[in-house]
Amino acid sequence: MSAPPLTFEVFTLFPQAIQAFLASGLVGKALAGGLVAVHCTDFRDFTHDRHRTVDDTPYGGGAGMVMKIEPVVAALESVERARGPMHRILVTPSAPRFDQRVAERLAELPRIAVLCGRYEGIDDRVREGHVDECLSLGDFILNGGEIAALAIIEAVSRLREGVIGNPESAALESFARAAEGTWLEHPHYTRPVEFRGARVPEVLLGGDHQAIARWRAEAACRRTWALRPDLRAPQPEPRRPLGLVIEVSPEIARDPTTGDLLHWLVNLGLPIFVIGARLTEPAGIVSVRDLRELRRRLRREHGRSPQLVALGAGAEEISGVGLLFDLLAIRGDDEASLAPLLLGVSLVGDRSRLHEGADALFAPLPSSPPQNGLELAPGARMIESSQPQPAAGPRELVAAALHRLCPASA
């Protein structure tokens, strides 16, 4: 015996607009196959005057007209008597945001009613006493609720079994719930391999499915942190000790602004080590001769050799160490070891010994990755043209890398 269809009841002044959209695409196929049902009810059918009036001027004055309560409530009650109870939703800009989590919740319901307002909206007594919840499609205004209703119908319907041909599509797309959190979807490409000089990433052409899966996971990670970092926040506390390594030169050590930077870094609340020059250190900062001495010191303290990740040139793309932790988890490094993690920032440019001795380089466009280490950035930067790309000096570089872990440092 087949399951009953997921049923939507749409209350609108324009039922033809709803029906025309639903006649095609996957939802149209779901309707034809009995997986989804959509009934449209016209508010005007529940008026009692010659002109089928559904609106009136607002009490208190003001621009525009307001939809009357009588035809709206009459329509709701008539449909419930005819077809049974339903979860009532009013779509309005002044409401919580509709998102994938809401769609997942609604997909578990058998019958959903969506009320589409027009003009200045529906008399608020409907909101106060005749609906179960209100939802907004986003922070913008439409002429009516029909487009919002269609968006809800499509987003919810595609979560019902059988509506999408390949269930894996829904599991891997943007906003899909995963054990480690929520991601935007990775980029997609198809033929031709090259179009006007733009090539498909080589990893997708090589047939190495493990490498492709990792590339897609990293691309999704970087896109999420670039465009919607809120989807990854708040980040969990790291499970291993975290410290900061600053490489300076004698010339930089004598620069008065370096002392200001170091004093500012103390406020981050992290162990801070300086290599490359001896300094008169503020409390909380330790000078060490080189990376070898630093590794020995931390190995004695923690019983494990630290992992040093150098923040490379161009790291203004870095949204914070949350991105780094996500990339390390994708590569398996964070799960494999509880060794201390050191973030390294070099202020000496091309003569950096820190980069040469690092276990991993973290930068959008690395020029010289570690000889025996891990390159955490893809070979080519994933372009997000909608996002500004500001330049960053040393202080901004450190701040960008650590801001999400230590918000008080901003």
Image: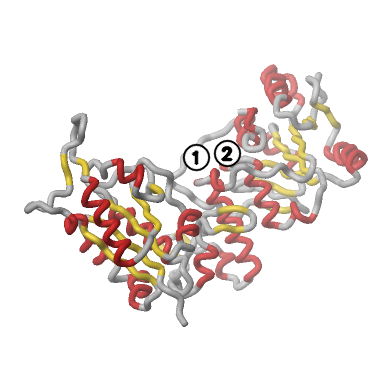
Question: Dot 2: what SS?
Answer: helix
User: Going by the picture, which residue comes out furthest to the bottom?
Assistant: 1
Residue 388, given in percent of the width and then of the height, sits at 47, 39
Residue 315: which quarter of the image? top right
User: 12 or 375, which lies in front?
Assistant: 12
Q: Is residue 55 above or below residue 178?
A: above
The x and y percentages for residue 262 are: 72, 24
Q: Amino acid type of disc 2?
A: Glu
Does residue 101 show up? yes
Whichever of callouts 1 and 2 sits on the residue coming sooner in the sequence is 2
Q: Residue at x 38, y 60 (%)?
A: 86
- Mark 1–mark 2 CB contact (< 8 Å): yes
Report x, y in % for residue 5.
40, 72
Question: Helix, strand, or loop for circle 1?
Answer: loop
Report the front residue among 393 and 283.
283
Say few, some or many: other residues with alpha carbon within 10 Å of mark 1 (under 14 / 14 to 19 / 20 or more). Answer: few
Q: Residue at point 54% right, 50% down?
A: 224
CA gap between label 1 and label 2 equals 7 Å
Residue drawn at (51%, 71%) of the image = 167
Which residue occupies the extreme left position in the image? 50
Q: Residue at x 29, y 51 (%)?
A: 145
For the residue pair 81 and 261, the one nearer the viewer reads as 81
Q: In which quadrant of the rendered image does the C terminus lie?
A: top right
Q: Which residue is mark 2?
A: 316
- Quadrant for residue 114, please give it: bottom left
User: What residue is pinned by disc 1?
Assistant: 389
Taking 399 as reference, is 372 above or below it? below
Q: Is residue 350 left or right of residue 116?
A: right
Three-letter amino acid code of the residue under disc 1? Gln
